[in-house]
Image (cartoon, coloured by chain):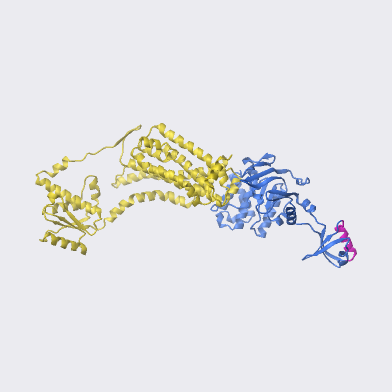
Amino acid sequence: MNKIWIIARREYLERVRNKMFIVMTLIGPALLVLFGILPALLFQLGAGEAKRIRIFDQTGRLYQRVRDALERERKGDERKARSRQSAGRYEVSSADEMERSLEDARRELAESVRRGEIDFYVILPRDVIASGRAEVYGRNPSDLFTVDDIESAINDAVIEARLSDAQIDPHRIASLSERVRLNVVRVSERGEENISGAGFFVAFIVGFLIYMTIILHGQAVLSSVVEEKTSRVIEVLLSSARAFDLMMGKLIGISLVALTQYAVWGLAAALFWVYGLAALSASGVNLSLPSISPFVLPYFFGFFLVGFFIYATLYAMAGAATTTTQEGGQLAMPVIFLLVIGFYLVFPVMRSPNSTFATIVSLVPFFAPVIMPVRLVTEAPPVWEALLSLALSVLTAIGLVWITARVYRVGILMYGKRATLPEIWRWIRQP
Amino acid sequence: MRPSASSDGEAVLVLDGVTKRFDDFTAVDHLSLVVRAGRVFGLLGPNGAGKTTTIRMIVDITAPDEGAVLFRGQRMGPRLQNRIGYLPEERGLYKRMRVGEQLRFLGELKGMERKEAERTADIWLERLNLAEWKKRKTDELSKGMQQKVQFIATIMHEPELIILDEVFAGLDPINAELLKKIILEFKAKGRAIIFSTHLLEQAEWLCDDICLINRARKVLDGELREIKRAFRRNAVALRAEGAERVLDDQELVARVVSRDEHLEVVLQEGASPQELLRRLVQSGAVVTKFEQIEPSLREIFISKVSES
């Protein structure tokens, strides 16, 4: 036991002091945030100069309305929220003063686009109010946001025109067709609480985090085993400790590295929660973080640890049976495939966390470490299910540790030769 | 043949009919030997004879298929590993670990307290002229230096049995001499030392007892001096002026072979070297070298192997 501890400590300290680890741990959350908000930032930056739009309005009634719709800072519900960013993004002009036929106007406007004087031009035919058909031309019609904005502006203008033709007050329509707002409340053992769409996001993050850390730190186990083998340290180690102690020490050490990383990230999240949110709301951004029950945390760590042990032992086995990290990776591939399947199962499980399907897959030991935490943060399953799933996984982990120790003992002394599957099977069976 | 009864040291390690097989290949075949305290035991044989497999069973890396390894009378097991120090032929250290931390870790793994391991490592690094490398990463060291670090790891926990597999390989003469001195100090302290090599010349100047193995089997073992005596030929290395008349005596000398530095005088059966020396002195020959020729281990090994 003492030797397991010594080995775990070496493994832990060597890794935690490694520059890569420090960088990844500190920058990891920053990167995550960056990739999270970068698209939004780019979208805002990408707006660039205002788009010049010229409108050829044959009806003579719509131009003003369309221009207002495009240039006005619109406020309102969800779909308008995006348009808020479009304030000042459009410079709208009329092509009406050109008393020409449709054909001539078309030719003239197309030429303006080609010369770069305008970006888009819009044709509002005489019958647009009845037919609801209009045309937009531009050098870059794949600028979907602009096209979309133009469409909704015309749409609003045409509907408004139709309403006033039918002598209906548009404001009355607006107030009558006010949308219903749904307040989503989760009912659980802890009572009722309001949730936002972020719950979905959290479930995904939880699944992804467990999946990623198992893969990353599992790989670390593999390369660590292979390193001891290729550097031949293993000979000295085995003359001082049992193969089982070496393996357990390594697994414990690396799992502690993963937990350290979680702790740092957890602390960062907590600080953000306390200070960052306040700062953000002070500056007008209202970000609501979903609340997660603190009762989920022990489960989360429990499932991470079992998951780590299940997959890391398999990685250790692959390392012991091969001579290079690449070979080991190949041998571990089918196993990792299981983990990947487990991760993909997160999506259907998120949609209906308490379906029979979700219940079954969250009990399968190879999937449970990823699936069960997802269920726990979405729609808490009965406690006995969570515990049963944990117990099954623990049993599997113990079985795998036992099997892997046997392979490890023999395989770790084989240099320069990759073990075949029948060989590995024989090592497991031999006393 | 058992090691000579004249060995005064107590038996530290006993191998009793130890056998190891890999599939249908037998790496070690019913090997028995005794390693005693205060003596250097040479485990000798060509590459692939089974030396490393034997050592791995001694330090409990692998278990024998048959027979027993007894350390101080107890069956070898993980509890006893701390009392043995093993320097494998294939050197291995953690490349990216600092020298000092590496030694501390390996010492702790052998049951030393953390502080004690650190202190002892410092003392030995000083002694082996590595003190200024303590904080460096291991792969910044030359091969020879790494070897000295590994040597420290082998002996720092003061083991009762020290196993050195090709300990001098790749070392310059000065460092080899330094290590030899330390090995002899441990011997003087009553530790048992197993010295494994395929270079029989090295064994001659270090070993008290030897065991020659070839193709998994023991060829010969015993006290080195005794073995040499038993294989001694009735021959003398001679360098002298005016010795021709005596050497022509057919009753005394069987034949004379001219070597680079001397004449090898093979005596007739029943004639003694003393007789030859007396006759030479009487005849007025000037003798500058007179030495009874002992066969080298190499010669003994070759004759034993070709015999069987």
Predominant secondary structure, magenta span: helix
Magenta span of residues: B270-284
Q: Residue at x 31, y 54 (%)?
A: A42
Q: Residue at x 18, y 63 (%)?
A: A111
Residue B116 in the image: state x and y as whole percent.
Answer: 61, 46
Chain ID, yellow in image: A
Shown colour of chain B? blue
Residue B231 in the image: state x and y as whole percent.
Answer: 79, 54
Say if residue A7 shows up in the picture: no
Say if residue B141 shows up in the picture: yes
Q: Residue at x 10, y 46 (%)?
A: A164
* B136 relative position to A291: left or right: right
Q: Quarter of the image holding residue A298? A: top left
Residue B287 in the image: state x and y as whole percent.
Answer: 84, 64
Residue B79 in the image: state x and y as whole percent.
Answer: 63, 40
In the image, is residue A355 above or below residue A98?
Answer: above
